[in-house]
Image (spheres, coloured by chain):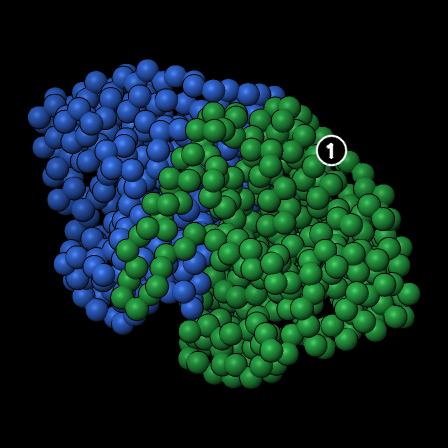
Chain colours: A green, B blue
Amino acid sequence: MLPQFRVSLNEAVNVSGDDLKNTVAGIFVKMGVPQEDALIGADALVLADLRGVDSHGVSNMLKSYVNGYTSGQINPKPDMKIIRETPATASLDSDRGLGVITTPRAMELAIKKAKDVGVGMVTLGNARHLGMASYHAMMALEHDMIGVCMTSAPPRTVPTFGAEPRLGTNPIAVAVPAKNDHPFVFDAATSSVAQNKIEIARRLGAKLEPGWLATEDGTPIMEEMDVPENYHLLPMGATRELGSHKGYGLSCVVDILAGVLTGFGYGAVPGRPNFGHYVAAYNISGFDEPEHFKASMDEWMQMMKSTKPAPGEERVMVAGQPEAEMEVIRRRDGIPLHPEVADWIRDTCAELSVDCPF
Amino acid sequence: MLPQFRVSLNEAVNVSGDDLKNTVAGIFVKMGVPQEDALIGADALVLADLRGVDSHGVSNMLKSYVNGYTSGQINPKPDMKIIRETPATASLDSDRGLGVITTPRAMELAIKKAKDVGVGMVTLGNARHLGMASYHAMMALEHDMIGVCMTSAPPRTVPTFGAEPRLGTNPIAVAVPAKNDHPFVFDAATSSVAQNKIEIARRLGAKLEPGWLATEDGTPIMEEMDVPENYHLLPMGATRELGSHKGYGLSCVVDILAGVLTGFGYGAVPGRPNFGHYVAAYNISGFDEPEHFKASMDEWMQMMKSTKPAPGEERVMVAGQPEAEMEVIRRRDGIPLHPEVADWIRDTCAELSVDCPF
């Protein structure tokens, strides 16, 4: 079983999504971010919390963003520039803006291009942290488009057979609309596991699963154990025999599309701006009648969900389903914040003179 | 270690790539395929052999294609039709043509669109077997483009927690040009392992690695053992703990883009045409100066290849490197055919009155 990472509901401070969004937007504004941008950033962070993706929500990310603005690493008022453009493509210099906020702008451009010519594909160089990749991909859904998002992050993952980290967690997100069912939303690191989960496991004293990490010399750790002091992430697949060359190869694809292709370098370039992003929108009407496609997606998802489970398993799920189910619960019951996180938000609000409704 | 699947060089019949190509083209022509198409098909099959991808080369695939033409399953003279089109997209009805031959036509269209508007993306419905996915993706390279290819194949892979196969091996190929180095060429099934490898392991009496297969009831087989009589493939990642939800999710992405999006159904639809394909070309000049990009790719590949190896490992490689190295050897020394395969080709040539130079 996977360790249970969520905060116990007994001790949690429950906050409604709207309240949390206003508070976070207020904090962004105090960092010098324009109001409209602050609302975009808050929406992205809170949607991660609402969907149960706590690793990329307010509790896990806001503090580092505040630190980034305060230290000058992140530019609150980036002057985004289009460096190159064709009807279907563009590359942007995002001027050290936070990816959580700049990437939706890039996705809007991709969607506009997909409306005009069928596909839009935009890279962002000189960028900062992306947030939840699927937030940006999901922007395509209401336009009857398929959305894609990737990010090339600083190196933490060893290549297959390697002893040194050369690749980030390099996630891939793909969002596809359905008709009556929830959308298909795939969003996963191409590393074995997200860095955040390791550090949460360390804090909780949970055991590592085999295949999650490599020792400092690059040897895959294939037994259950405590989180070691020093480690590297493995590519998805863990070992060559289990297919780590596939995870490694996909991570390279992300590093190329969201790194090299931006023209601003890639994850392992020392001193380069830390992140590069890639978004794309595919207009479904360029391939099929959107209503027919979305009805087919309903049928396809039902086919997948109705798969007979293996012994000991409850049900087969589809990407985006656990998040859609969690979103229903948290929109109704609120987002459970760890008391320490709630305290940090309260303190930060007090310091910055931002209203805090909890 | 992975089992050694290649035919022993002592017993092999060595054939030059050009000789094999002429022979294969001759066989395609006797199946009713027009000369120009026959040469495309032969080129694709023989390139797989030259690159050491024996699973998708002449020895492993030609027989099934001949059977498909003979039984009427594959149409030798397909009337390909564009069903929908925008400047960047098209969907094609490939009229039961062999994907090995029809997909290069679709890729030509994608490349033309990428020249015009920056990106080209084309789906093929009503299709037959794709061959080696990277063949089609690699067509983009000489145009300073990034090529992508995927195929939605008949179900053999169980979803995570599932007991019934719902997805094909659903490979993803991505080809990226470099300046002086070989191109980056990723080409991998999103299942744990290719079906062909299992059957070759059975023939050779080799042991299965843990994480390659599920038993008939969907339970992942996590110990070394002989190939069982009945089995399903697992998604890349093998178990939920090792990340099979990521392999499963990526396989779904392929099933959607190369299946649902074609408008002709997906892998698990009973009685549907068996395969759907997806190709795309991204024009590098829509993002960056191509010469700058390709020089950066050289640098990026050198960075990856120079990674210090983990204990017991010889070197870190990059996707496309083993194939590029094998291509040098086989273009010089010829393609080693298993004697039984050489016999089958000789017999088939005799039967069809095709010249056989070996």
Residue at the image position 47 percent from the left and 40 percent from the top: A180
Q: Residues within 10 Å of mark 1 (few under 14, many from 20)?
A: some
The residue under label 1 is: A84
Which x, y percent locates residue B269?
A: 29, 37
Residue at the image position 66 percent from the left and 29 percent from the top: A113
B242 to the left or right of A264: left
B295 vs B217, nearest the viewer:
B217
Residue at the image position 90 percent from the left and 66 percent from the top: A352
Asked if A308 appears above or below B46 in the picture, the reply is below
> Which chain does tag 1 point to?
A
Residue A262 position by quadrant: top right
Q: Quadrant of the C terminus of chain B?
A: top left
Q: Amino acid at mark 1?
A: Arg
Mark 1: which secondary structure? strand
A265 vs A135, nearest the viewer:
A135
Which x, y percent locates residue A300?
A: 38, 41
B171 to the left or right of A205: left
A150 vs B143, nearest the viewer:
A150
Residue at the image position 70 percent from the left and 37 percent from the top: A108
Which x, y percent locates residue B220?
A: 29, 65
The answer to whether residue A144 is seen in the rendering is yes
Asked if A148 appears above or below A75 in the picture, the reply is above
Residue A311 position by quadrant: bottom left
Which x, y percent locates residue B2?
A: 31, 63
How many numbered tags mark residues here?
A: 1
Q: Quadrant of the N terminus of chain B?
A: bottom left
A117 to the left or right of B85: right
